[in-house]
Structure formats: structure tokens, C-alpha cells
């Protein structure tokens, strides 16, 4: 695995009686990493622990080689954080707000102002930069949050649900920005989201969280597994009998709410069409008609569902 | 329209300041924001009217001995000046201080601030500095300037030599007012997301404690319970600082302890409320 930007070693965080993180150990490599999980999985808590907002009950957190507990200021000077909720400094226009954030991050006043203009153009708010942030639309507020996180040129960005509340066009533009930052500008980022397509489009790696633990992690490609070994199948006949027959034949299948079921064929295929013949053979022996059979490309949704036990 | 990312992003190669000066950035921004409000600027200018009146009084007393009996300058003049500035301290505290943290909490700005390389103490220090700057401007600075004017107009050091304690007294007396008002207001501001509610809380704290003391005074017929009132406690301590007999029967040390406890409580509230994440249990 490539060099890591964030490591967590047996980190536990508790809010009152609620355990938000349970002995979490994880390594986030350089590049764009998606932090996936259903609501309440512990994604935001993990980011807030890495920022030093939340003190873990146990365990150690390292960001860019620095221990968060020992050197919080050094860590935060190299981080950019785009919070999930709407957030701004009241009473300021966009350029003042972003320049102010630059100064708070240690940039000299003139540099902070220059960077504020540049970053606002970059996120697409150049024309609206003298407007008071409070008058911005939801999409613009998302962009200004990204701008304030970028102004001091961080080595690592934490993006917490960056496309929340955005219209489709704005969402696409935001994802383009995130992808550009990660792949062309050399900014490492951790994208926390419950929107799988957002993560799949922008990230190379993924960490899936569930109930305060890491359910799975790795590159998206590796987690998805080899293409063509999962098949979409629709049959006419007794479905439970067919599923039982598939399982007896060593294939994995499960009934779904939709009329198309997925069948996974383990092992290495003997030849072209071998898998399809096996499935049809099982269908024949189970007395059902195959109405639809085609290879299915595994998606991040499959990975996610498998990781959190919904598959 | 071309894709927005084509407008590019540059890495920053310039200097970075890691000297813990974020509090000054916060303070300066807060001061500028308040001075940009014309009405508030008017209040700041108007708060110097008592200074001008006292300066004229000192000039007349120093240059027209026959008017000395009417315009007599004594150590009590400086004590009274600080007391008269109390009304400006109150209005400025409410106006400038109520929204200092409340507005940040309303806009979820705390997580923006605290994700930057600054400590919570720097954030609180910066906000406190905004209030302290305005309050010092109506207490300490004009108080010391009046002493300087007394020397300048009289052309000698006789008065100041005879009352050398006045310099530290003006400094301490001002700081008592400034520190108590600013820490209390800031703590109350951190308790709410509404600046109006914070202003009401502060006004209530000042007037309610005064009212309670007034009622107890009527019932008991003495002033031993003056420690119940924030302003009475400040008055007691300031009287002692200016070597004057305290107005009320409450021992000054009790008043001082009450004020110290109030400041300690305010700091404790700030420590609990100023956090990057709000945990609702």
C-alpha cells in the first residue's frame, strides 16, 4: 500500500453512553479516499477526532506523520476541513471570509487576500465574491466552505458530505472540483459521504464504516472484485427451489425485492460461457425457465452492501 | 461556460505564521466590524463627552484659581469619572459583546475557527480582546489622559505627587470594570445562539441583582447584602482602590471574592461552551 496520510490505531470515542467509534484501526493512503457508511456509522466522529474536536477515550491518531494529541496545531495547519453543516463567519462577504480564514491559518494578510480571490475563482464564486455569504444559495454555501478549506493550501482535505443540498449541475461541478484537486493538484483528501456514486467518481480508495467499526477498506477496484463473475438472472418458476439448487451447486445467490436476482460464481471460469451454462444447467434441474441472464458489473454499492451485511 | 476547475488552483509557496497570532486576527476583525456600524461609532465618540467635560474642568481649575472652589479637582474627581463611565461600559458591553460568540454559534462558525491552527484559548482571547479594547477606550485611556492633562494644565507635579496612588488606582479601577463586564458578557454570549437573548441575559444579570439587593436593603434596613449586586460589588472594590470609604456595609473583601468567583465562573462556562463539536447527551 502507498504511503499513508492518516492512521488510526485502536481508537475509541464515546459520547455519554453511546460508543461512536469502537477500537477502530485504519490506514488512509495518499490520494482520494472515500469514507463510506450509513448515518451514525461514525464517519463524522472520525473526522472530528482527527481534527482534535473530540478527544478519543483510547487509541492514537496520526495525520501526515504527526500525532494529533501531541501536535494539534501543526496538524490543523496542514489540514483543510469542509464541515457537513452550513457554516460561515457571520457578517462577512465571501472574499473577506476566505481571506480571514487564510489569516487564521497563518498566511500573511496580503497573501491571504490574494489566495482568497484565486480560490474563489477556482470554486466558481468569482463573480459573487463581494456578496455577503448569508445571501448565498445552498450550493454556493457548499462552494464557499470548500474555498475556506483550500485557502491555506492544505496537504490533506477533509470533506464531510460536500454535495449535500446541491442541485444536479452543482453537484457534478463540485465532484469535478474534488476529482481535480485529488488527481491533478496533488491534494490528498478524505471524502466522507453516504452517496456511493460521489465516492466512486472521485476516489481511488474506500473505507467502509458501520456501527463505529471499519467494515472493509481497500482500493475500489480490488473491493469490487473481477468483473463478469456476477450475473443478473430473472427466472420464471419456483424461486426458492432455484436458489436452493444454486447453493447446492456451489453458487451464491439470494432473493431480492427486485425481480432480477444476482448470482455470484466463485472460482476461476473454465472457459467462455462456462458460467452461463452452469446457471442454465441448475435452472433446468430446478425446473425453472431462465428469462434473463447477463454479466453484472460489480458496483461500489455491492461492496457497501456486502460490507455492512445487507448483501 | 468552461468547467470551473479550468480556472485552476495553485499550490501556496509563501510564508506561514505559526506564532499564535490568530487571537489578534480575530480581535482586529471584530473591532473593525463594530466600528463599521455608524451608530456604534457614534456611541464610541459620545463616550468621550465626559472626558471633555472633565478636561475643561481641570483646565479651569488649574488656570482660574477663583473658580477652584467650584471646579475643585480632588482624587474623588477621578473616582467619579470612572463611575460615570459605567453607563457607557454597560451599553458598549451589551452592544459589542452580546453577539461575539452567539453569532458564531448561530452560523456554526466555531467548527470553522477551531479547524484552523488556533487554540480555543486564542479564540476566546481574540473575542475578549474586542470587548476589552472598547471598554478600555472608555475607562482606562481617558482616565490616564485626565491625569496627564492635570499635570499639563497645572504645570507642576504637586497634585500627582501628593496623590501618587491615583495612577495605579485608575488602572486597577478600570480593569475591575473591564474584566468583570467582558468575561461575564462573553460567557453569556456563549450560552445562546441569539445575540438578543445574550444581551437580555446580561441586562437581566445587572439589573436583577441590583433589584434583589434593593429589596433586601429595604427589608433589612442595612446594606450588608450588597454582595448580591454585581454593580455594588464593583463599586465597593473601586472605592477601596481609590482609598475611599466604601458605600455599603458589605466588607470589600467579600465583594472582591464575589467578583473573582463571577470571573472564574465565566471562564469555566467559556471553557465548556467553546468547542468544535456540540455533544447533546
Image: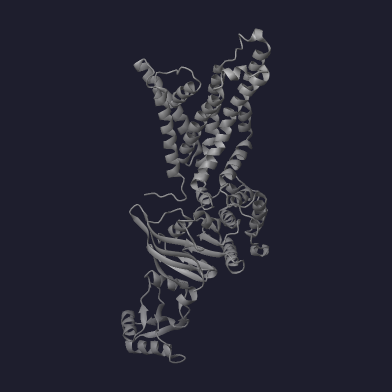
Query: Which residue lies at the image location 57% right of the left edge and 31% below the top edge?
Result: B136
Q: Is residue A42 visible?
A: no
Q: Name the spot of residue A37 as percent of width and height, x first.
A: 43, 64
Q: How is the protein colored in the picture?
A: one colour
Total numbered labels = 0
On screen, residue B91 versus residue B220, left or right, reads right
On screen, residue B215 versus residue A51, left or right, reads left
Q: Name the spot of residue B71 as percent of width and height, x first.
A: 61, 12
Q: Quadrant of the rendered structure where residue B23 is?
A: top right
Q: Quadrant of the C terminus of chain A?
A: bottom left
Frontmost residue, B208 versus B151: B151
Up-down: is A56 above or below A235? above
Q: Quadrant of the rendered structure where residue A235 is?
A: bottom left
Q: Name the spot of residue B201 as percent of width and height, x first.
A: 45, 33
On screen, residue B220 versus residue A138, left or right, reads left
Up-down: is B104 above or below A66? above
Q: Residue furthest bottom?
A: A271
Q: Is residue B181 visible?
A: yes
Frontmost residue, A215 versus A161: A215
Frontmost residue, A302 versus A79: A79
Up-down: is B240 above or below A196? above
Q: Name the spot of residue A271 as percent of width and height, x first.
A: 45, 92
Amino acid at each position: 500500500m502507498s504511503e499513508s496520510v492518516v492512521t488510526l490505531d485502536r481508537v475509541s470515542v464515546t459520547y455519554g453512553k453511546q460508543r461512536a467509534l469502537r477500537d477502530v484501526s485504519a490506514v488512509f493512503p495518499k490520494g482520494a479516499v472515500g469514507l463510506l457508511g450509513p448515518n451514525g456509522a461514525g464517519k463524522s466522529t472520525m473526522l472530528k477526532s482527527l481534527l482534535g474536536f473530540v478527544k478519543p477515550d483510547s487509541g492514537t491518531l496520526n495525520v501526515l506523520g504527526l500525532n494529533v494529541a501531541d501536535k494539534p496545531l501543526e496538524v490543523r495547519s496542514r489540514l483543510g476541513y469542509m464541515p457537513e453543516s452550513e457554516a460561515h463567519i457571520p457578517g462577512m462577504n465571501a472574499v473577506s471570509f476566505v481571506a480571514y480564514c487564510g489569516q487564521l491559518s497563518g498566511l500573511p494578510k496580503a497573501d491571504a487576500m490574494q489566495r482568497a480571490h484565486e480560490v474563489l475563482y477556482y470554486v466558481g464564486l468569482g463573480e459573487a465574491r463581494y456578496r455577503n455569504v448569508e445571501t448565498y444559495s445552498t450550493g454556493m454555501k457548499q462552494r464557499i466552505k470548500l474555498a475556506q478549506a483550500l485557502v491555506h493550501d492544505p496537504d490533506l482535505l477533509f470533506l464531510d458530505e460536500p454535495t449535500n443540498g446541491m442541485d444536479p449541475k452543482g453537484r457534478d461541478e463540485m465532484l469535478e472540483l474534488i476529482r481535480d484537486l485529488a488527481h491533478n493538484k496533488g491534494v490528498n483528501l478524505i471524502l466522507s459521504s453516504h452517496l456511493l456514486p460521489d465516492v466512486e467518481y472521485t476516489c481511488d480508495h474506500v473505507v467502509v464504516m458501520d456501527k463505529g467499526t471499519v467494515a472493509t477498506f481497500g482500493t475500489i477496484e480490488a473491493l469490487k472484485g473481477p468483473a463478469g463473475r456476477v450475473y443478473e438472472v430473472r427466472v420464471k418458476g419456483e424461486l426458492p427451489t432455484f436458489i436452493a439448487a444454486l447453493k447446492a451447486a456451489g453458487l451464491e445467490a439470494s432473493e431480492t425485492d427486485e425481480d432480477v436476482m444476482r448470482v455470484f460464481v466463485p472460482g476461476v471460469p473454465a472457459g467462455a460461457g462456462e458460467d452461463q451454462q452452469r446457471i442454465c444447467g441448475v435452472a433446468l434441474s430446478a425446473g425453472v425457465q431462465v428469462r434473463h441472464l447477463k454479466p453484472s458489473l460489480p458496483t461500489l454499492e455491492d461492496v457497501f452492501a456486502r460490507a455492512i451485511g445487507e448483501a | 461556460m468552461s468547467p470551473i476547475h479550468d480556472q485552476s488552483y495553485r499550490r501556496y509557496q509563501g510564508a506561514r505564521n505559526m506564532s499564535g497570532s490568530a487571537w489578534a486576527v480575530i480581535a482586529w476583525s471584530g473591532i473593525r466590524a463594530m466600528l463599521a456600524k455608524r451608530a456604534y461609532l457614534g456611541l464610541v465618540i459620545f463616550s468621550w463627552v465626559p472626558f471633555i467635560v472633565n478636561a475643561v474642568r481641570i483646565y479651569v481649575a488649574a488656570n482660574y484659581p477663583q473658580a477652584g472652589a467650584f471646579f475643585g479637582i480632588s482624587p474623588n474627581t477621578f473616582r467619579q469619572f470612572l463611575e460615570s463611565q459605567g453607563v457607557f461600559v454597560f451599553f458598549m458591553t451589551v452592544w459589542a459583546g452580546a453577539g461575539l460568540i452567539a453569532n458564531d454559534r448561530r452560523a456554526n462558525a466555531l467548527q470553522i475557527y477551531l479547524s484552523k491552527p488556533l487554540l480555543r484559548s486564542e479564540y476566546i482571547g481574540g473575542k475578549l480582546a474586542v470587548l476589552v479594547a472598547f471598554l478600555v477606550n472608555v475607562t482606562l485611556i481617558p482616565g490616564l489622559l485626565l491625569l496627564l492633562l492635570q499635570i499639563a494644565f497645572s504645570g507642576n507635579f504637586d497634585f500627582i505627587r501628593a496623590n501618587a496612588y491615583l495612577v495605579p488606582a485608575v488602572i486597577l479601577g478600570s480593569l475591575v470594570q473591564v474584566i468583570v463586564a467582558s468575561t461575564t458578557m462573553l460567557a453569556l454570549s456563549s450560552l445562546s445562539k441569539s445575540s438578543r437573548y445574550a444581551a437580555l441575559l446580561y441586562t437581566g444579570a445587572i439589573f436583577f441583582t441590583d433589584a434583589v439587593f434593593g429589596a433586601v436593603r429595604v427589608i433589612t434596613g442595612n446594606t450588608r447584602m450588597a454582595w448580591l449586586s454585581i454593580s455594588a460589588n464593583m463599586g465597593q472594590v473601586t472605592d477601596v482602590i481609590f482609598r475611599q470609604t466604601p458605600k455599603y456595609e458589605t466588607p470589600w473583601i467579600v465583594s472582591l471574592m464575589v467578583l473573582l468567583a463571577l470571573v472564574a465562573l465565566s471562564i469555566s462556562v467559556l471553557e465548556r461552551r467553546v468547542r468544535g463539536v456540540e455533544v447533546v447527551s
